[in-house]
Amino acid sequence: MDNYYRKIQSEAIIMSYKGAATASLLNSMIDVAQTRLSLLTEQGQVKKRVFSILVELLQNIYHHFQDTSYLSMQEDDAIIFVLARDPNGYHVSTGNYVSNSEVPRLQAKLDTVNQATADELRARYQQVLNNGTLTQKSAGLGFLDMARKSGNKLEYEFKPYDHQFSFFSLTVHITAPQP
C-alpha cells in the first residue's frame, strides 16, 4: 500500500488521504474536495465530471469498508485517496482492502466495463437503470458511470494482502483541456 501511495502522489496533488475510514470522514473528504475543485480554473463540465467520479469512488470505499472486517490490518492503513492534476487532466485514485472472495466479481465487472465501447457503456448504463434490479453490489452502475464520464479505461489492480484480503486500487483519469 505504501508503494502505491507514493507512486500516485507523483503528480500535482490537490488532495490526498491515507488512514482509517468512517462515514463522517468520507463525507468531510467530499466537502473538502468540492471546495478545492471550486478553486480550480477548469471549465465547469470538467469539474463536475471530476467531482462525480470522486464521489462514486469514495462511496465504493465506504461500501467495501463497511462489508469488510479489518481485524487483521492496521486501521491507519485502511484506505488511500488521491485527487491530482496530471499532464492530460486529472486523476482520482483510491485504494482499500476487499475480501478475496469479492476479487473475481469485481475484476469481471471492471474487465467488462473496460472492454466496452462508449456506445456499449451508454446502452449498459441505461439497461441497468431501466432494469429495476439495482443493488449496491450487483449492478456495477458506478463503474459504468465512471467509465462513461471519464471517457477512459478504469485502471485497477488487486494485490493479495493475506489469505482473507486483497488491496484493491482503482484510478480513473479525467481528460481536460490544457491551460
Image (tube, grey):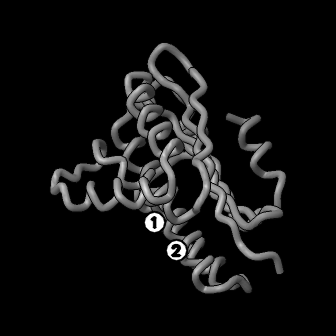
Q: Choose top left, top right, bottom left or bottom right for residue 23.
A: bottom left
Crowding at mark 2 (Cα within 10 Å: few <14, some 14-19, many 20+): few
State the image coordinates of residue 29 (x, y, percent, origin top left): 54, 65
Q: Is residue 101 left or right of residue 157?
A: left
Label 1 element class: helix
Q: What residue is shown at x 49% (from left), y 37% (from top)?
A: 111
| Label placed on residue 118 | none
Residue 81 appears in the rendering: no
Q: Are marks 2 and 1 in contact (CB under 8 Å)?
A: yes
| Label placed on residue 27 | 1
Q: Residue furthest top?
A: 163
Q: Is residue 91 left or right of residue 127?
A: right
State the image coordinates of residue 143 (x, y, percent, origin top left): 45, 51
Q: Is residue 103 left or right of residue 41?
A: left
Q: How many labels were placed on the picture? A: 2
Toward the viewer: 142 or 40?
142
Crowding at mark 1 (Cα within 10 Å: few <14, some 14-19, many 20+): some
Label 2 element class: helix
State the image coordinates of residue 113 (x, y, percent, origin top left): 47, 45
Q: Residues under labels 2 and 1: Cα distance?
A: 6 Å
Toward the viewer: 48 or 94?
48
Q: What residue is shown at x 75% (from left), y 48% (from top)?
A: 8
State the image coordinates of residue 78 (x, y, percent, origin top left): 54, 40
Q: Which residue was labeled with disc 2?
A: 31
Residue type at mark 2?
Asp
Q: Please state, as top left, top right, bottom left or bottom right, where the N terminus lies in the image.
A: top right
Q: What residue is shown at x 77% (from left), y 62% (from top)?
A: 13
Q: What residue is shown at x 60% (from left), y 26% (from top)?
A: 159
Toward the viewer: 23 or 105?
105
Residue 137 appears in the rendering: yes
Residue type at mark 1?
Asn
